[in-house]
Image (cartoon, rainbow, N blue to C red):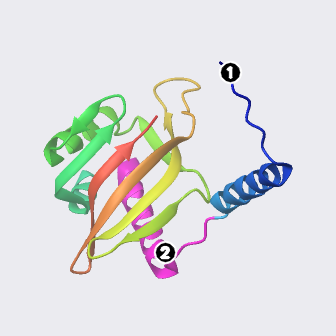
Amino acid sequence: MIYKIKIHPIFHFLFIAFSSNAQENMRKYIPEDKILYSKIDSMDKVFFDAYNACDIEKQSSIFSDSIEFFHDKAGLINSKSAILKATKENICGKVTRYIIPRSIEVYPINNYGAVEIGFHRFYNNQEPDAESKPSKFIIIWKKENENWKITKVVSLH
């Protein structure tokens, strides 16, 4: 038996109005904490400038000793030395990361730090026309005293 559900036109209108409003709000990210946003945006730049320059020592100083790196293709790496070794062998001098302008969102995590969500792309100079599509990333930052450390990364391609 097939049932047909009639939706009153006013409910249909409200559904469309609320859906449009939700989509509009999602496009207009405004940082809840502008100071925190600026700090994490700055830390992202510091870390990825080191990444692009192959400054392994600087990257190491920003990664937490208990880092967990979740990569949709490679899986989980939970060894700081393994992440740095893979970066040195596979990234240094070969790959450059570019942030997608205005894509970063930062949300506070009470009594811990912050979560950064954004889009970036990579250019592999070893392969012609090898610029990646924009991909999403999530970084969990922990504030330890006055230092910010990356404790978790989720990289989605």
| Quadrant of the drawing holding the N terminus | top right
Residue at disc 1, secondary structure: loop
Seen at 49% across and 31% down, the residue is 125
Does the segment drawn in magenta span residue 33?
yes
Seen at 39% across and 62% down, the residue is 115
Residue nearest the observer in this picture, 21 or 105? 21
Seen at 58% across and 56% down, the residue is 103
Give the x, y percent position of residue 49.
Answer: 41, 56
Number of the front mark, 1 or 2 = 1
Q: Residue furthest right?
A: 9
Residue at disc 2, secondary structure: helix
| Picture quadrant of residue 93 | top left
> Going by the image, does 80 lie left or right of 154?
left
| Picture quadrant of residue 83 | top left
Give the x, y percent position of residue 106.
Answer: 47, 66
> Going by the image, does 9 lie left or right of 70?
right
Which label sits on residue 38? 2
Does the segment drawn in magenta span residue 92?
no
Which kind of residue does numbered mark 1 sit on?
Ile
Residue nearest the observer in this picture, 53 or 139? 139
Specify start and end residues of the magenta stretch as a single range.
Answer: 29-54
Which label sits on residue 2? 1
Q: Is residue 8 above or below residue 123?
A: below
Residue nearest the observer in this picture, 133 or 86? 133
Q: Is residue 41 above or below residue 90?
A: below
Q: Residue furthest front?
A: 1
